[in-house]
Amino acid sequence: MTAATFTDTRGRTPVVRSRGHGANVLRRLLRNPVAMIAATIILLLVLMAIFAPWLMPADPYATSMLKRLKPIGTEGLPLGSDELGRDLLSRLMLGGRLSLFMGIAPVVMAFIIGGGIGILAGYAGGWLNTAIMRCIDVLYAFPSVLLAIALSGALGAGITNALVSLTVVFIPQIARIAESVTTQVRRSDYVDAARASGASSLLIIRKHVLGNVIGPIFVYATSLISVSMILASGLSFLGLGVKPPQPEWGLMLNTLRTAIYTQPWVAALPGLMIFITSVSFNMLADGLRSAMEVKQ
Amino acid sequence: MPDMQTAHSPMIRLHDLQVEFRVPGKRVQAVNGVNLEVGPGEVVALIGESGSGKSVTLRALMRLHPERTTHYAGTLEVAGRDVLKMGKRELAQLRGSSVAMIFQEPLLALDPVYTLGQQITEAIRQHAPVSRAEARARALRLFEKVRIPSPERRLDAYPHEMSGGMRQRAMIALALACEPQVLLADEPTTALDATVQIQILLLLRELQRELGLSIVFVTHDIGAAAEIADRMAVMYAGRIIEQGPAAELLTRPRHPYTRALLKSRSEGAMQKGRRLDTIQGAPPDLSRLPAGCAFAERCAFAAETCLGGQPEETRVGPEHSVRCWRLDELPAQGGPVQRAEPVNG
Amino acid sequence: MKPTHSARDPRDLGGPRQPLLSVRELKKHFPLKKTGLGLRGPRLAVRAVDGISFDILKGETLGVVGESGCGKSTTARLLMQLTPQDSGELVFDGLSLGSPGLSLRDYRRQTQMVFQDSYSSLNPRMTVEDSIAFGPTVHGVSQREALSRAHDLLARVGLEPARFAGRYPHELSGGQRQRVNIARALALEPRLIILDESVSALDKSVEAQVLNLLQDLKQAFGLTYVFISHDLNVVRYMSDRVLVMYLGEVVEVASADALFEQPLHPYTAALLRSMPTTDPLRRTEQAPLSGDPPNPIDPPSGCRFHTRCPDAQAICRMRAPVFGEAMPGRSVACLKYQPGSGYAASTIALKEVTHA
């Protein structure tokens, strides 16, 4: 099989070692051109967001009534300007910070909380599982957009509140996936064998369950990043997320919408950024999934 | 007896059949030159261990392997027609009406959301222009034929509501719905209990006699094969290494591999406290087949000659042929098996 | 042939005469989920194991046979305590499981199991050596020591440690994986190993190799086996005594030779006659049993086998036989052998049992 092997001397005798699962997945992922293009785009976007303050050609907050809604390619304004005459390129670069943060942070938090809940429910089984999963189902019953808006509305506008409400939206989704994969693993013979050796539940979860469920949950979570970005942009668009004048792609899309007839290309740019980023995350998630799914 | 017809027009004719699976970075030669003829009304058992190519050969008869990654070569004729040259429509017709197949696990082959009656009437109506009522009446007759108790009620049952043996009977009924001439059976009794297995084997034998079916029966269990087959073919590493009439092959096996297989079945071989005779090692990797006899590295009688090239089919009796380089050097035929036979009674 | 106890195992409490494991009235019903509007009425359950009792003697191999659904796999899981029983008791070498003298953890160190599916019983993300070393580390053996024990065991089951210790399960063949599973079971130095269809999924030639290995290991480590299989040939070869189950009950126990040469229970007899021959001249002409085993949710009244029994009489439908000794060393649950049961001893059986 795919046994590029090496020897080591961990035990008494030198032993031929096979490449581990993680290394195999990475190798297959590296061979997938679509996933690699997506990963490169994401990497560039992240770098752009991190180094925005040093890379920006102009001050993103400096308004100018003279330079309002200039088209793409105007001298000094490579991507045009917004309705207050601010440099759009600089705003898009700095805006990427919040947009990416709002895409990734809720998913990471939901991954930890929802994943934990789901694994607990899945491994416990029985009435505890039923109790936990019914509670989760209540949240799950609301469409995610509605739930996010309702929670943000109730908590009030602001980045922290948007973050909390998005996290709550994703917890049930991730918990469900985590519960179903954990249930599968719990019923497998190797978990029975571990129980038969006298291991405690905690040890079994740590040694036998986590390694087998984290992959699928992670893949699912990755695919949620694009949803999270779009939802966060939506919240900002509705005035429930980031507040002006801070740049954020969703908020920019909102304020530029009035210019859709005068400068359609400029107005569409923040939307294009959201689109490219979310598609890239989805491609990467797809690539990860197929890299993990390969029948060994 | 069917023997009269075999000579003119075999139902199935395989000549030098090769099946190769091409997956990225690898070529798996699953079947490597199989010659086999099955006459009308004849039951042939293909015997072998996993990876011997028996199931691949069987599925090739209906071209069931994924078209994109499978490469066929050689001759593959069913009812006188070249299966390898068939178009999509001809193939669909072949699969439905002249050849039918039954599987090891009926639950996977039957549709869980329709009742058995619906599935069988549907199959009947696809191949014959009959009314729904007429199709249902035929389905009922089929259920009676395969000995399903209270058939009327069972027609309205879903597959999961039946026991394993009943499901297998229902799948046989479904396979017979379009009055095929050839029945392909892929380990149909392997998942069943011995008590149910023998019932299904007897049923197949009876249906075969009554309907004049040709059956190709794939199994790893020589016992099941002995209960049903007129002729047997033993496969190893994608080739038939020995074939002949069942009685002949069981009592006078010639190939060392056949002998070893039979020896492990004979009753004396499993005497308490005695170590079991084993065939050491494992079958070869199908993506790296040796140039010579594939069994040579596990064979007790192997010699230098065995490694050079493929042994040809040698005729050792009427319809009995063997592929072995050292046929003449082998010890007196049937030694251990002959000794064990009387114990069997 | 009994294995010789050259040096007595310090863990042996009751001496060679005391059964290693006594199973007393073990019962396990799996309740079915309620469907439809059945608010009233008794709750249905699959009566997988319905009050079975038997002994496993020290150093023996006890074969367990029966059709699917007879409860043999549930019995294995109950013996391993992977499923809790509804009622009944396990007494291991004189100590009742759950009593202060024998905790579940202690019991599990002395009893291990090898499953049928060699692939699904190994963690796909763990190397072979880590899988084997896991059990000992649970019981306080250091990682270093456990790994070195794993390497010794690999060598013992015929897998070269240098080649196999660092491999993952998917890289091994079925036979090799089952050897790893056997090594893992041995890693805790158990006294009893439950082999639940452990060789059934293997090809015949590989099966023979693993059976030989199991015999060698039994000798070398003074093990006791429970050998569950549907293959009667293999059970006869492996077992000292054989236990026959039907619909959650034990119907016959006898020494392997006696049972195969002269089965007492009509079910055992039918089971033996269902084995295919390799003699083309002596093909089976009539199936010894008709139909499938009845549903264990609603087993037949009286003797559970009466619906398929060739010797059934009217009394068998009404009266359940008591499992007991019919002749020395042979126990059976059949009214035929039960004095005063009302079974007419004459050879004329009332053939009034009609099949639907």
Image (cartoon, coloured by chain):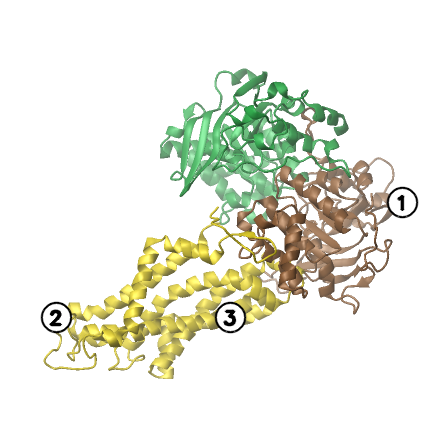
Q: Please name the residue shown 52% across and 60% down the image.
A: A212
Mark whose residue sits in front, 1 or 3:
3
Mark 3 crowdedness (10 Å alpha carbons): few <14, some 14-19, many ≥20? some
Find the distance from the CA under tag 1 to the CA under tag 3. Answer: 59 Å
Image height of C230 relative to C31, above or below: above
Residue behind mark 1: C328
The quarter holding residue B78 reads top left
Mark 1 crowdedness (10 Å alpha carbons): few <14, some 14-19, many ≥20? few
In the shown orientation, is residue A52 left or right of residue A170? Answer: left
Image height of B73 relative to C14, above or below: above
Numbered label attached to residue A116? 3
Colour of the chain lettered B: green
Chain ID at mark 1: C
Mark 2 crowdedness (10 Å alpha carbons): few <14, some 14-19, many ≥20? many
Residue behind mark 2: A71
Look at the image and tell me whether residue C66 can be seen: no
Mark 2 or mark 3, which is nearer the start of the sequence?
2
Look at the image and tell me whether residue A22 can be seen: yes
Q: Quadrant of the N terminus of chain C?
A: top right
Circle 3 — which element?
A: helix
Q: Amino acid at mark 2?
A: Pro
Image height of B315 relative to C318, above or below: above
- Return the x and y of residue A219 as percentages of the image width and height: 42, 62
- Return the x and y of residue C246 as percentages of the image width and height: 73, 47
Chain letter for yellow, please: A
